[in-house]
Amino acid sequence: MNEYDSDKMKDLLSKEMDFVGTNIKEEADVLIVNTCSIREKAQEKVFSLLGKWRKLKKINPDIVIGVAGCVASQESDAISSRAPYVDMVIGPQTIHRLPKIYKESLKSKKTIVDVEFPLIEKFDNLPVVSESKFSEMVTIMEGCSKYCSYCVVPYTRGTEVSRPLDDILLEINSLVDNGAKEIILLGQNVNAYFYEDNKGNIVNFGLLLFYIARNKGIKRIRYTTSHPNNFDAQTYLAYEKLPQLVSHLHLPIQSGSDRILAAMKRGYTVLEYKSVIRKLKKARPSMTFSSDFIVGFPGETEEDFMKTIDLIKEVEFDQSYSFIYSKRPGTPAASLHDEVSDSEKKLRLKFLQETINTLSKSRSKSIVGENVEILVEGKSSKYNDMVTGRTTNNKIINIPGKDNLVGELLNIQVTELNNKSLKGEILIK
Ligand code: 5AD
Ligand code: SF4
């Protein structure tokens, strides 16, 4: 979501204000950092970066400095007091007001702060794309109303708000007309999508997938992130009926212990989570899964942690975003007593990540020799004269080839696994 917002801010500055991007910060007239406050470390990095930018501003006082995103939203007072040289503080829902905020900041000597949540206004005011990309992100909803006990998102991005169906479909049509083949639907809880038109017709996430798939130019549909409690019959049906929908799902579980899930206020048990996985696999037997995990949540015992490991092995998650719990001010979990040592938490995280890497490697090994379809994404970062593509199960495969293959769906044979990376050859039909 932050990448999407950053792209939109770049688009706004270039289209509406004629700015040109530069990689040399000393050359810049405007410096904006788009921020994340999900964990403390990310937040502290913002202040250390601002310290560096302050030095640039001493040399060139005309530089306009902005802080955007969730740290802006949560820490607007702290930014104004700790870093008064910051000119603009822009929340995640007001990035479309950037040109206006910029002009105001030029006139005023004070920090301009705009961290409101003006519902869906943002999307009506962002520029339309002009650059052709084979893969495009489309925000379908924003915010979160789940209030997990450890998480700042509902406070920084606001509660769940869905975009109107027609707006989404029109945006997707124009992206496809412009060359997009893959659409990635974005939102903090995409499957909480809910839209009611003026005739009282209701569109949920599953139905939205069917509407989107009507555009035959779309070869692949991905989405992130979903919540286990928002899966419904229509979404399962989509996995049965829509081959464009990829066979890989990132479905955050956070912990494999019911006790910890309850303390996290996730709203489901391990059994309920596994029931979602079972239904998805029934609809699409080739499904694979990745997940988010929080290690060392207050009160997590070795036994709780081992339940997470058992679950990982059972579901065979082959990728993860896993982090040590970070205490976030203002969240209910911040007041929980935390007796697990940092070194123990680090060991648990390492063990969890090693377990997933082993599963990932064995899955990679199992597809060597198979014929699979990949969507080519770009030049390989590892090998010269090779490009990188992704299978429907989210495996990255390098094949010989050049830039002109980017955006192509190709049938390939997987030929080898070298350390972690897979290689393949194009199959001539
Ligand atoms: N500490 C650690 N990880 C967190 N996440 C959210 N809040 C925290 C926190 N306080 C992780 C969760 C979530 C992902 C977006 O970030 O795993 O799924
Ligand atoms: Fe945060 Fe995700 Fe929970 Fe929402 S569902 S509160 S974004 S962890």
Image: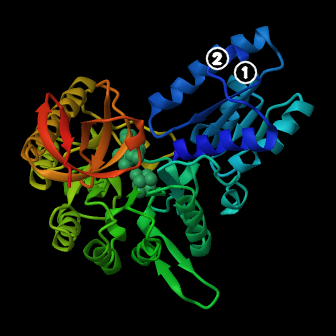
Please count the marks in the image: 2
Please name the amino acid that badge 2 sits on. Answer: Ile
Residue at the location (72% across, 16% down)? 27
Q: Secondary structure at mark 2?
A: loop
Towards the viewer: 342 or 164: 164
Q: Badge 1: how crowded within 10 Å, few (<14), some, or many (20+)? A: some
Mark 1 — residue?
28
User: In x, y percent, where is residue 76?
Assistant: 68, 37
Element assignment for label 1: loop
Measured as percent of width and height from the top left, residue 43 is found at 52, 31
Residue 28 found in image quarter: top right
Compared to residue 211, the image places residue 90 above or below, namely above
Q: Position of residue 133 (x, y in %)?
A: 52, 48
In this rendering, would 301 be left or right of 30?
left
Residue at 35% in and 27% down: 381
> In the picture, residue 421 is in which quadrant?
top left
Which residue sits furthest bottom?
Answer: 199
Dot 2 and dot 1 residues touching (CB under 8 Å): yes
Label at residue 24 = 2
For ligand 2, which image quadrant applies?
bottom left
Of all residues, the one furthest to the right in this rendering is 107
Say which of 118 and 257 sits in front: 118
Q: Amino acid at mark 1?
A: Ala
Report whether residue 60 is seen.
yes
Residue 59 lies left or right of residue 177; in this view the side is right
Report the residue at 14% width, 29% height from top.
418
Label 2 C-beta lies within 8 Å of the nearest ligand 1 atom: no
Q: Which residue: 17% across, 65% down?
A: 271
Alpha carbon separation for disc pair 2 and 1: 7 Å
Along the line of sight, the residue nearer the viewer: 263 or 394: 394
Q: Quadrant of the C terminus?
A: bottom left
Judging depth in this view, the residue of 116 and 207 nearest the camera is 207
